[in-house]
Image (cartoon, grey):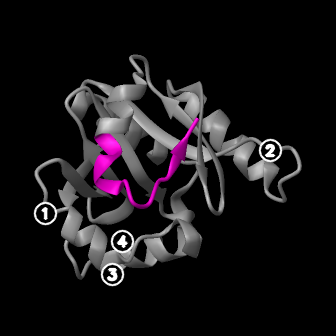
């Protein structure tokens, strides 16, 4: 059974996983994440299986939905069920629609197989394609959600990131 705890500013394993899993154009400065996590509507959680670090989530909690900005599992522990277990814990913790963005399934992208694997993983864990797209300077993202997706709720939930997320269509 996994346990979660709030991320601390000096949690080396979280910082290393964050920097290794996300490309520069998708990352906020880590200290900015720590500042945001002081808000009551933000949770930055690390997950452990006993004392072993498994992964982390960075979530923004809105009145009707939760937006998972970052979700990562330790590369050495992937394909062992930990990612699914973390998503299950999130669903139990929040009991409302959970939204997240993944790179759009563009067949011409150089990492299409990785994108497909990610999409299949989320679909297997109860997420569905909302058919909305988020357009950023560095690419297009598909918005996925568990049941109960509402675009207005999604927009309200991510408002604290407004300057970073320009266009949804």
Query: Is tag 1's residue or tag 3's residue first in the polypeptide sequence?
Result: 3
Residue at disc 1, secondary structure: loop
Q: Which residue is mark 2?
A: 106
Query: Is tag 1's residue or tag 4's residue first in the polypeptide sequence?
Result: 4
Q: Which residue is mark 4?
A: 14
Q: Which residues are magenta?
A: 157-169
Horizontal arrangement in the rendering, residue 111 relative to residue 160 (left or right)? right
Q: Are the residues tagged 4 and 3 within 8 Å (C-beta)?
A: yes
Q: Which residue is mark 1?
A: 38
**Residue 31 versus residue 106 in the image, above or below:** below
Query: Is tag 3's residue or tag 2's residue first in the polypeptide sequence?
Result: 3
Q: Residue placed at 52% from the left, 59% from the top?
A: 77
167 within the magenta span: yes
Question: x%, y% of residue 68?
Answer: 38, 46
> What's the mark number on residue 58?
none
Classify residue 18 by image quadrant. Answer: bottom left
Q: Marks 3/2: CA distance? A: 34 Å
What is the crowding at mark 3: few (fewer than 14 residues within 10 Å), some, or many (at least 20)? few
Q: Which residue is mark 3?
A: 12
Q: Are the residues tagged 1 and 3 within 8 Å (C-beta)?
A: no
Q: Marks 4/3: CA distance? A: 6 Å
88 within the magenta span: no
Mark 1 vs mark 4: give the one in front: 1
Classify residue 98 by image quadrant. Answer: top left
Q: Marks 2/4: CA distance? A: 30 Å
């Amino acid at each position: 059974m996994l346990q979660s705890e709030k991320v601390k500013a000096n949690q080396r394993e979280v910082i290393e996983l964050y920097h290794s899993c996300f490309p520069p154009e998708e990352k906020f400065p880590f200290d900015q994440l720590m500042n945001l996590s002081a808000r009551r509507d933000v949770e930055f959680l690390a997950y452990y299986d006993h004392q072993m670090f498994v992964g982390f989530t960075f979530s923004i909690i809105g009145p009707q939905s939760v937006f998972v900005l970052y979700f990562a599992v330790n590369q050495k522990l992937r394909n062992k069920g930990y990612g699914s277990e973390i998503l299950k814990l999130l669903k139990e913790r929040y009991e409302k629609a959970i939204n997240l963005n993944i790179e759009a399934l563009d067949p011409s992208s150089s990492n299409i197989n990785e994108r497909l694997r990610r999409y299949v993983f989320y679909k297997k864990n109860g997420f569905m394609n909302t058919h909305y797209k988020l357009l950023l300077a560095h690419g297009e993202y598909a918005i996925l959600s568990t049941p109960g997706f509402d675009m207005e709720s999604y927009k309200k939930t991510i408002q604290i990131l407004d300057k970073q997320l320009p266009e949804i269509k």
